[in-house]
Every structure is written in structure tokens, then in C-alpha cells.
Image: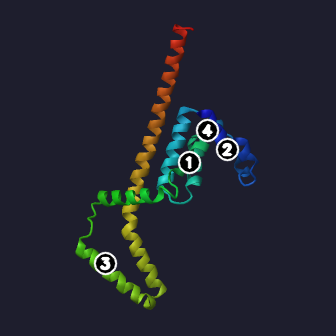
Amino acid sequence: MLERLKKLLPTKDSLHSNRWLRWLGPWLNHPRLWHMSRKGIAMGLALGVFFGLLIPVAQIPFSATMAVILRANLPVAVASTLVTNPVTFGPVYYGAYRLGKFVLLEEEPTADEIERLIEKKARDKQLAGEFSMVDRIQYAWHQLGKVGKPLIVGLAIVATVAGVLAYFLIHGLWMLRVRWERRRRLEKMRNPR
């Protein structure tokens, strides 16, 4: 499995030969960034999942930068940011928003409040031609503030928990694999065929 993964990921030489990334050469030369070790892969996956869930844009540069700083496996850190993609983006962000509302103890609106809100939006659409650009920006900022706080809190919680779980899951699976391989070798030595 590791050999297949190595074939899919970019190599150190391919990144050094890329004209856009060549200037990063001194930082990308560290061998731990490319080594398939338990700690490196676990940290790379945790970083990628964390930034993939936390940040909606520029996930790869943040994940790669932190992988270089923390000496985690760079290709795994970059590839694991794809945990959020066009298919998973909506459910992840909606779930994070709901979690944020729950954590912040924000209540769901009642049926009367929802009806008043719909009426207000209808009036706002009618008056939209009369609003200045400043009024529209202030209104949009206010609406974003309603959604933004629970979303940010929820994303921070989901990203942190998922990153920590990914780290320990990889650590545990790697150790189980090593033990299984060791047990298999011992069995072969005891029962040669």
C-alpha cells in the first residue's frame, strides 16, 4: 500500500524541477518531509485534515507551510486537505454551523420569527433599489455575522477533533500493522514450510 501511495504523490525531485516551486528548494530539502515514517505521516495527515476542514480557501499552502515547519510528511499533508471537496463541502459546513449554534447555545427561531423574517426579506427585496451600496454592505456584513460566529466555532471544533483523531488513528493503525508483521514473521520462523 505504501508503495502505491509513493507512486501517486509528487517526489522531491519533481517539486525541485518545477519552475514555480524551485525557490523553495532550501526548505524542501529536509529528508523528514519526504520520509514515510509513522510520526511524519500521522502529523501530515492531521495537518491536512485540520486545515482542510478549517479553511475554505488556500488550504494547501497553509498545510504545506505547517508541514515544513513541523517536519511532517509534506505529500500526505497536501493530499489530505482534499477531505473537503465540492461533494463534502456543504454537509461539513452545515454540520459545523449546527454544532456552533449548539455550543454557543443559540436557539432555533420559532415559526412566528421565521414568518416575520420571510416578510422582512420580501420587504428588503422591494426596497433593494433604494438602498445605497454602503447600506447593502452593512446588511451583508450583519447577515454574515449571524452565520459566521457559529460557523467559525463549529469549524474550529470539527477541525481540531478530526485532526487529533487522524493523528492517533494513523499512529494506532501503524503500530497494529507492525505488530501483525512481527507476529507473522515469528510464525514463519517457528513453522517453516
> Depth check: 185 or 37 in front?
185
- Callout 1 touching callout 3 (CB < 8 Å): no
Report the mark closest to the observer, 2 or 4: 4
Residue sitting at x 58%, y 43%:
76
Instruction: Give me the C-alpha separation between circle 2 and circle 4.
Output: 10 Å
Quarter occupied by residue 144 = bottom left
Left or right, 183 with respect to 127, comes to right
Q: Amino acid at mark 1?
A: Met
Residue sitting at x 67%, y 44%:
10
The residue under label 1 is 66
| Image disc number at residue 84 | none
> Depth check: 52 or 181 in front?
181
Classify mark 1: helix, strand or loop. helix
| Image disc number at residue 5 | 4
* Disc with the residue nearer the chain's start (1 vs 2): 2
Classify mark 4: helix, strand or loop. helix
Q: Is residue 118 above or below residue 53?
A: below
Q: Is residue 92 above or below residue 116?
A: above
Residue furthest out toward the bottom: 130
Instruction: Give me the C-alpha separation between circle 4 and circle 1.
Output: 21 Å
| Image disc number at residue 117 | 3
Instruction: Give me the C-alpha separation between circle 4 and circle 3.
Output: 51 Å
* Disc with the residue nearer the chain's start (4 vs 1): 4
Classify mark 3: helix, strand or loop. helix
